[in-house]
Amino acid sequence: MSQWILYAASAAATVAIAGVGAFVAVEPVRRLLSINIAYSGVFMAFVALARRTTSGEADPVPHALVLTGIVVSVSSTALALSLTRRLVRATERSGRDSSSSPDEREA
Amino acid sequence: MTFDWLLDATVAAALPLVAWTVARSVALSRAIVLFIAFGLLSALAWTRLGAIDVALVEASVGAGLSGALVMSALSWANLDEATVARRSVIARAFVAAAIALCLGAVLLGVPDPSEGLLGDVSANLGDAGVHQPITAVLMSYRGYDTLFELVVLISAALTIGAAKSARLEARPGSDLLRALADALLPLCIVLSAYFLWRGSNAPGGAFQGGAVLAGGVLVSTLAERLRRPRLTVWWIRAALVLGPASFLLVGMPRFVEGAPFLEYGPQSASRAIFAIELGSLVTIALVLASFFPGVGPLETAPDASSERTRGHR
Amino acid sequence: MTVSGVFSAGFLLAGAFFFLAGTVGILRFPDIFTRLHAVTKADNLGLGLVTVSLMLEAPSYAAALDLAIVWLLVLLWSSVAAQLVARDALDRGEVPWRGA
């Protein structure tokens, strides 16, 4: 089994596990972690495919795409965290200001 | 079975395993630490696959900065919600297996071996002006991608500023951290300049340099040596758009003469690329540093109902 | 198998042993302060031994110096981080483990 096949299989498994993890997670931060890991799995697939050359040197174009992708994924994570934090602050403020009892709020 | 194969197999098997532990760990702090470990393991995998630049970016930005970002979320995230929705294990395993099999079939069905664009990149490297193929692809062959990626970064930074979610974190000052920041920030500046300079000939470039510089700025912000970059200051705004601005400055003269936009020409290509990388480094460092909330001294009576985002001192 | 190769392999194995010891410490020690000891001391010593082994195999003196600098930086960072974590744990009220 050549090297790139190993890593491509690993990438497929990572995307599958992290994808399912992103859907079953209840908490937004945990969902964000799983989505990031799914991103990483996709990047791994790219880089593994770049390794198929006959000379053994990797094809640099997928590497550049992955580099761009990593930086963009970090900025989308930061944006998602910022919006989630705003949401958490808004819900806890409205929960404190409203006069409903905790049981009513749960419904 | 050579040792190389054993190492590759171990890393390739560990990656989905760590992904699974992130998805199923109960404590959020544990999930975050495992996420950082996953990032570093994938950096190792990418080094094995010959993608050194990508490994550098993943280790600094993907595992380091993004892990620190999520870790800073521990202070406000709701820690006692249920971890996983109640769905059966069988259903989850079935869906995961289906996705893995479909992806695996697609990935393993490609022609092997395949040159890809390696030949075209190597053949035209002389015209590109740099010796490092990845820098050539990023800045020369696919310069438009990089330009718009910088625009995406800037819009993320602007949106985060507009969301006004960052609040000054109250914390007591730490002299230990201050000493460390004083030692580390000059080192980070030198290291990022080194990465920028070496990007033409060896793994490096604007992204890695910007990430290291952002790390140094972040430590100094935590130690209260610097303040978080605020968009209300005019020269921060100017520095933020320095990346796309340098693209435009470099690409415009030739465009006005009638050549396609961003066509450097083989003589001035290396200087043009260096100028663009310099501008991009400033933009990237500033954007990455502005993702993190600022810190301030310990307040005596935390005011929960007013927005303190403009209270930076 | 050259002499430096044998030494390099020896240092690598010793480093791996210390990493293993540090990991066992994290898993088995009773409270955060003792676990910090395991992480910083054992893991950094393991890293130092691995660095020495890599320095023996380095292609040039500059590369060997690079590796040594990396180890020193990790040492610096991890000791500061351990202090900060321990102080924060004390502030939060964690009581150090005392007992049999």
Image (tube, grey):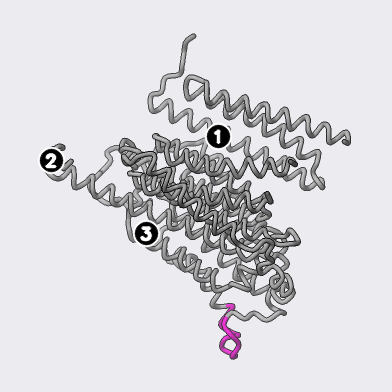
Q: Is residue B224 above or below residue C9?
A: below
Answer with left or right where residue C30 lies relative to residue C53: left
Residue furthest bottom in the image: B258
Numbered badge on residue B15: none
Q: Where is residue A84 in the image (x, y as percent from the top left)?
A: 33, 51
Identify residue type, mark 3. Answer: Gly
Q: What residue type is labelled 2?
A: Glu
Q: Which residue is farthest right? A: C2
Disc 3 with disc 2 on a shared chain: no
Image depth: mark 1 or mark 2 in front:
2
Label 2 packing within 10 angstroms: few (<14), some (14-19), many (20+): few
Q: How far apart are marks 3 and 2 (CA)?
A: 35 Å
Q: What stretch is highlighted in magenta?
A: B250-261
Horizontal arrangement in the rendering, residue B219 relative to residue C50 (left or right): left
Q: Which chain carries label 2?
A: A
Amino acid identity at mark 1: Val
Would you identify the image quadrant in which residue B13 lies? top right
User: Is residue B249 located in the magenta-colored stretch of the structure?
Assistant: no
Q: Mark 2 points at which residue?
A: A104
Residue B161, numbered label: 3
Residue B127 x, y percent position in the rendering: 72, 77
Figure quadrant of residue B77: top left
Q: Is residue B296 visible?
A: no
The chain under label 3 reads B
Between label 3 and label 2, give the one nearer the viewer.
2
Most common secondary structure along the magenta stretch: helix
